Image: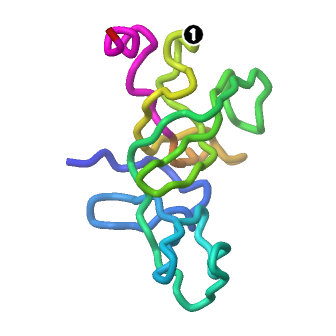
Amino acid sequence: MQNRPKGLFAVDKFFERTPDGPVLVGSRCRECGKVCFPRKKVCYKCFRDDCMEVHPLAKHGEIVTYSISHMSHIGMPTPYAFGYVYLPEDDITIYTLFKDWDPPEERLFIGQQVEQCHDVFREDPWGNPMTTYLYRCTGSKSDSKGAEK
């Protein structure tokens, strides 16, 4: 059984609800194949406005860049890690928060493999949990060094 996300979605339009749970979606142009996130009504590659369809985004990618914040947005616990993940299957790079990134010297690095997940990332001003997509770090530097040998 899938883990159901808790609380409200931070940005509902990023998701499609399915019987298996929420799916992070962008849009894909039927004409040229360009994938966009968040969803677009017009393809910014071929400029067609009649070809965009909902497209589930890849579940796996790799970190392009990252940072750790020690200053909080309202209701967001610190520190938290954020950055950009390249999704090779969709040929796009998206902004995300990271999960399971501690200790950062072992878990956060350029090229780190990550997988998509959903989790509570903060509470709204009334104390309700807010859920969003995140990418979970799946390995460590020592794992990747072992694979290179």
- Residue 40 vertical placement versus 128 (above, below): below
- Residue 79 vertical placement versus 89 (above, below): above
The residue that disc 1 covers is 105
- The question of residue 11 being in magenta is answered with no
Q: Nearer the viewer, residue 117 or 40?
A: 40
* Quadrant for the C terminus in the image: top left
Q: Secondary structure at mark 1?
A: helix
| Residue at the farthest front position | 149
The residue lying at 33 percent from left, 58 percent from top is 21
State how many labels appear.
1
The residue lying at 40 percent from left, 39 percent from top is 115
Residue 141 is drawn in which quadrant?
top left
The residue lying at 59 percent from left, 47 percent from top is 128
- Where is residue 97? Give x, y as percent: 59, 37
- Where is residue 22? Give x, y as percent: 39, 59
| Residue at the farthest left position | 1
Q: Which residues are magenta?
A: 135-148
Q: Nearer the viewer, residue 23 or 56?
A: 56
- Where is residue 105? Give x, y as percent: 57, 10
Q: How is the image coloured?
A: rainbow
- The question of residue 139 being in magenta is answered with yes
The residue lying at 62 percent from left, 39 percent from top is 122
Disc 1 marks a residue whose amino acid type is Glu
Is residue 75 toward the left or the right of residue 87 in the image? right
Q: Nearer the viewer, residue 29 or 2?
A: 29
- Where is residue 23? Give x, y as percent: 40, 59
How many residues crowd around disc 1 within 10 Å: few (fewer than 14), some, or many (20 or more)? few
- Residue 34 vertical placement versus 145 (above, below): below
